[in-house]
Amino acid sequence: MPAPARTSTEAIVSAARGLLEADGLDQVTMQRVATTVGVRAPSLYKRIRDRNDLMHLVANDAARELGDTLSATASAADPAKDLVAIARAFRIWAHRSPAAYALLTTPVDPSWRVDPDMNVYLSGAIVNAAAHLAGDDRALEAARTVVAFAHGFVSLELAGTFRLGGDPADAYEFGITTLVNAIAAGGT
Amino acid sequence: MPAPARTSTEAIVSAARGLLEADGLDQVTMQRVATTVGVRAPSLYKRIRDRNDLMHLVANDAARELGDTLSATASAADPAKDLVAIARAFRIWAHRSPAAYALLTTPVDPSWRVDPDMNVYLSGAIVNAAAHLAGDDRALEAARTVVAFAHGFVSLELAGTFRLGGDPADAYEFGITTLVNAIAAGGT
DNA sequence: ACCTGAACACCGTTCAAGT
DNA sequence: ACCTGAACACCGTTCAAGT
């Protein structure tokens, strides 16, 4: 009784994320994921509990990737510049992975939410830069404000809700800069 | 050959929205919607094209309702106070209809997006107040900034992404006030 | 130990047949 | 003109049977 493992959890999550970004959420079916990794649907249940669990893993995977990106952006030299650079990297990542971004920020089912510790990791770089800029006691508040604006802007932009006149990149840059200046000045 | 209309598009949309808010998006099935309005699933297709069309109608309905709420909030006396009051009403509405809010702002399928004119109506009160506060030429920019922050904050809050220390209502109030002040001062 | 076909309970959607 | 049961192609998930 041999047991040739023909796939892996990693490959399954990666396939699901690929389908998500390419064809949208409702094309991420167990059957399509299975055939993508070269196996039949029932075999997936050896590695994941169910489809909700799979979506949760995909969300976590995207969060880790975004967290890595933001961490790699901070240079720790100038906190104000870092905060702007992080916000910029945040928007660029979301534009590259719009479906994963939506999954991450607006889980369709509560069980899809990323793990708490992953959320901490995800916001680490921003909170760190905010602490340097605004002081430890105001770090969370400042980080929250920046994240709220950045997420709100990107989310509306990706959803196509913006009746935007000018260049969105300029508007984003302007909003973030204004916010960071206000934080540095002790405003927010 | 009589033809007793046993339901209506309005009743169908209302039932769908009720199910959405009560049991979540994937409980909004054609069968449950149908039995809720006292009919069998195939009959729904006499009034709506398909499930995507139904979700689109639900999103539009929610947008109209939110638009009504925001319009009713503006008093046109003090634009700065109006903007804060509108932002407050925005958050309260979202908290009362979290599932509809998510549907509205993050459509799972592109076909669910609210109609362009409904989007204009939805942002009307905010743009109007912003115009009074910042001038016509900066109105859109100012409105966009406020909406980005408000949506971002509420969205993260509802998704449970906030590692929030203090009272979120206070943090929201503080952020909006700071933003409105900055706009009034010509900052953003 | 992993993989599979068959089966079950569900979907969305179509359509011929009823009134 | 609207409503319905039956049917079709799909889901997610379970499980006994294969190797």
Image: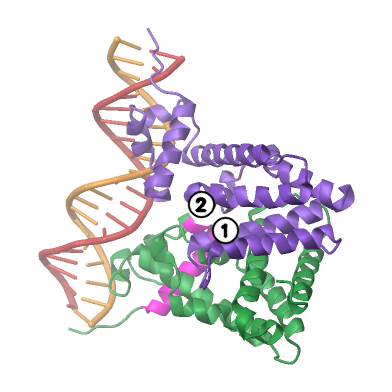
Chain colours: A green, B purple, C orange, D red
- Magenta residue span: A7-25
Dot 1: what SS? helix
Q: Is residue A69 visible?
A: no
**Left or right position of D10 against A81:** left
Residue at the location (80% across, 55% down)?
B141
User: Is residue A8 within the magenta segment?
Assistant: yes
> What amino acid is labelled 2 in the image?
His
Q: Is A10 placed above or below B144 here?
A: below
* Whole-number angstrom distance, CA of label 2 to CA of label 1: 8 Å
> What amino acid is labelled 1 in the image?
Val
Q: Foreground residue, A148 or B39?
A: A148
Residue at the location (50% across, 33% down)?
B49
Q: Is D2 placed above or below A75 here?
A: above
User: Is residue B64 within the magenta segment?
Assistant: no
Dot 2: what SS? helix
For the N terminus of chain A, give its image quadrant: bottom left
**Left or right position of B158 against B147:** left
Residue at the location (33% across, 29% down)?
B40
Name, please, the residue furthest toward the top: B1
Q: Which mark is residue B95?
A: 2
Q: Which mark is residue B154?
A: 1
Q: Foreground residue, A149 or A66?
A: A149
| Dot 2 and dot 1 residues touching (CB under 8 Å) | yes
- The chain that hosts pointer 1 is B
Q: Foreground residue, B122 or B185?
A: B185
- Other residues around mark 1 within 10 Å, as few (<14) / some (14–19) / many (≥20): many
